[in-house]
Image: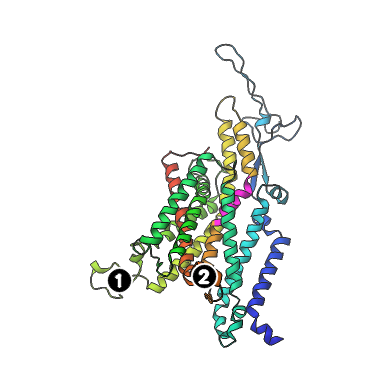
Amino acid sequence: MLHQFLTYKNLILHLSLSLTLTLLLTFLKLPIFFLYNLHTYIHPDHIPPGSARAAIRRPDSDSSNPELRKRPKFKSKNNNKAPDFDENNAQIFRLKLDEAHLQTRLYFPDYSNAFTFSVVAVSSLGLQIYLNPDSSSSSDSDSSSDFLINASFVPVLLGFAAVSKLVAVLGKVSAEKSASRRSEKQLSAVFGVVGLVVASLLSFKYSPSVLDFDFEAVDGNGRLFVAVLMGCLAGFLFMPAAKSARAFWLGTDQIRSDLSMLSCEWLGRMVLYVNHGMIVFTVLLWINPLGGMLVNKNGKVRNAEGLFGNVGFTASDFGKFRLCCLLVSCFMQLVALRPNLQMYLNEALLCWYQRLHAGKVPDLEYSRAKVFLHNHYLCLVVLQFLAPPVLLLLFLGLSRVEGISSDDYQYACSILPCSAFVREVAVFLAWWILFVWAVYSSAAIFLYRCCILYMS
């Protein structure tokens, strides 16, 4: 019995870890705890007299008097009275998100399932990477049972299933009718086609000269599959990256509103700055000739003119450094998820504030609709912010799994070459997600800086 346990310990550990994490995440409600204590806003349609009053007080009003003064009426040139402005119905309330709020939001089951499945898949991949050195100890066993002894099929299957689920969820939320403007959906489709064309050029022709990736081991079917997947990711990530750029613009107080509730505190701003800078820096490490400037290919430097390619990391160390930068970018995006989500909710507050001061008799119907939509599609935006870093972690984990052979996955490897897909292509897809995110978010921030786009 003990011999059987030691022989199949990898398989037992994987199954135990997956089952334990699934039960813990479900019963402890960690997907809800991950979003706990964020602030949302409610714009009531009507506040009956005698109820709680808040939000709008003039600086010169007496704080001891709870009643709000009505604004004086004004007359136009034609002596026609303008309608009174009801300050009670212009109030907005700030609430903390809790379990009751989150469970009523649209796409909450999708978010909860994606969160649980992603944590289980990433943990299983991490366990397999940790157990890889021990896989050589079973080399003397019967070859017919190596498949179960190594147990690498468990994290690989979980990883591919999680990737498929996240890509499908991104496509589902991108097609949601009322969650975004029609122009955004059209741009998303256009960028998806452009991404497919660019991905085809990179995969079939320009990958060695432009990017530091080698697809010689990948056949035509594999390259076509990768190009289609890259095109889908380029289209699905447009709207999340645009929301991330708006969150960065609002969270770092680029609009100079001087309202403490709208922007992040100093820690949140630092996280947003470091996250964006780390993404751009990591993307540049795979682009030639920028990546070659940091690699020492010869080991000797005879003069100052020969510094390029002769100083810096060794090739192996530079490869590890780039993978570490990818991993840090993943974690920085996860850390920045809560500030980004809070800034998304604060967009509704900014819209209410702008409409409130737009005129003597403000029209708050637009801000009321915006507050409702930002509350209604909260979990949809969480999925859009959560999927990219989790996909990065999954692709990185799949690229580091040892013990994968074509004999173990005959059906999958009849379509795609396993070793090349799991190694080189997985890292390339992780880089592509960061590249697309960096291009979209940087372009949007530049347009905000040039006042071509604006927050509303």
Q: Which image quarter: residue 286? A: bottom left
The answer to whether 224 is drawn above or below residue 217 in the figure is above
Question: SS of the residue at dot 1?
Answer: loop
* The magenta segment: 377-387
Spatial distance from mark 1 to mark 2, Cα to Cα? Answer: 39 Å
Residue located 51% across and 69% down the image: 414
Q: Residue at x 64, y 43 (%)?
A: 375
Disc sitting over residue 413 in the figure: 2
Residue 107 in view here: yes
Give the overall secondary structure of the magenta segment. helix
Dot 1 crowding, Cα within 10 Å, few <14, some 14–19, many 20+: some
Q: Residue at x 68, y 59 (%)?
A: 30
Please say whether residue 338 is visible from this viewpoint: no
In the rendered structure, which amino acid carries the disc numbered 1?
Asn
Q: Which residue is labeled 1 in the image?
A: 310
How far across and how far down the image is residue 238, in percent? 50, 49
At label 2, which amino acid type do we have? Cys
* 282 to 155, vertically: above or below: above
